[in-house]
Image (cartoon, rainbow, N blue to C red):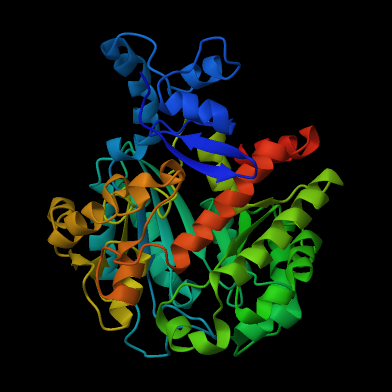
Amino acid sequence: MINYFNFKKIDDDYLLTNDMGKYVFVDKNTLKELINNDLSPNNEKFRELKDGLFIIDEHPEVFLENSAPYAASNKMYLFEGTGLFIFVVTKRCNLNCIYCQAKSNDCADADMTFEDAKKGVDIAISSPGRYITIEFQGGEPLLNFDVVKYIIEYSQSIKKDKHIDYCIATNLFALSDEVLEYFIKYKVNISTSLDGNADVHMFNRKCREADFSKLENQIAELKYRGCSISAIQTTTKYSLKHSVEIIDEYVTLGLNSIFIRPLTKLGAAKERWHNIGYEPDEFLDFYKQSFEYLIKLNKRGTEIKEVHASIMLRKILSDCSDNYMELRSPCGAGIGQMAINYNGDIYTCDEGRMLAEMGNEAFRLGDVNDTYNDLIEAPACKAACAASVLESQLRCCDCVYQPFCGVCPVINMANENDIISKSPRQYRCKIYEGILDLIFSKLKTCDAETMTVLKQWAL
């Protein structure tokens, strides 16, 4: 018997995947024999297909017993409570990014209060998961640092047996020595945005108060002090011709990873799409150039990974799930993350609160006066989960990349006014498919040195 699988032609062979997250490449004749349930045990691919759970060569009950751990491992995040709580401590910002999705402003009443912060922490601690992450977002969260401190110290005082990680997404321009010392004390992971060299970064992220050299100096200081510092990159139309310069800036600053991200049609990015946006193929050309250059750098001894590829390779090359919220089924909305806005409203995710800034409250779960159970039981949470199960989505269920991908109901709502896409082969889908095409083609044909790099990225 054969187990259910999906397939796609990659170069001259065919890629097969199944729900257990296994993959194998076969030639056309082997695929035909497999589909016709006529594959001989003498075929050189028989053992690989059997070990990959594509062939049921035993009693079905025994097969189910043997394959269940792999299926459970790929969905391990479903056995945990909400683990990520995003606190949007202020809507204020000191930058004016051309693609801002949060619609930040300078309103004096756009800060989270201590009272709402306390209630938000109480909700986070009531999650059944033992490990939680509290992430500070904005605007620029350092503009309301007193509330950041309060959330950290209050959560520490009531955490009981929970393990709490803290991270902050900041542009670093408001980072002082006092704040830095505090972050070192509480082991706060720092994430910043770095879109490339000075030319690209300052075009994308226009700064009201400081120049690019200050950002470079802050990153260097954080590295020197031994802080956990990472950076993410957002690609605009202007970025597309500067892949080498962008990566070289990361290398110069001693950063060992770069998260190459396409634009998302939310907030200012959607309003300015005709000026800063692009087609999926344009981004994929940029991504491939970046990917190849990163491989070349690693072969020369410079260790730097691309985060999208790292997440996908971890799913592909291991039997463990990766809990990146956008690339799982169902997505992390509500059950994996919640976003607590500056005014106390709570959304399924950060994208959900960004959509609310555009006037659509579809992904609002409730507010800080609700309990964790109330929020999980909210209709928006259930709808987002149901709408992001790939196994039941049009085309996704038949896609060879289903075990490694994900859909976003918020993006669907923003672009199509529906949580389920009626045109699934659109922008986001094409980009993820293109990245996975590149990765699997590389896995199929690469030399041993390149494979070593890819395995290091997956660690």
Q: On screen, 16 above or below 88?
A: above
Residue 310: % across, % down: 59, 46
Left or right of 325 in this view: 158:
left
Front-most of 373 and 424?
A: 424
Residue under the point 26% across and 63% down: 420
Residue under the point 71% across and 52% down: 256
Looking at the rendering, which quadrant does residue 343 occupy?
Answer: bottom left
Q: On screen, 62 above or below 193?
A: above
Left or right of 221 in this view: 206:
left
Left or right of 421 in this view: 74:
right
Q: Is residue 234 visible?
A: no
Residue under the point 46% across and 68% down: 427
Residue 247: % across, % down: 75, 63
Quadrant in which the C terminus appears:
top right
Q: On screen, 169 above or below 77?
A: below
Residue 368: % across, % down: 20, 65
Looking at the rendering, which quadrant does residue 176 occupy?
Answer: bottom right
Q: Is residue 424 visible?
A: yes
Front-most of 399 and 193?
A: 399
Looking at the rendering, which quadrant does residue 180 occupy?
Answer: bottom right
Q: Total number of numbered labels?
A: 0
Q: On screen, 145 above or below 168?
A: below
Residue furthest to the right in view is: 300
Residue 312: % across, % down: 54, 45
Left or right of 273 in this view: 66:
left
Front-most of 243 and 250?
A: 243
Quadrant in which the N terminus appears:
top left
Residue under the point 55% across and 39% down: 314
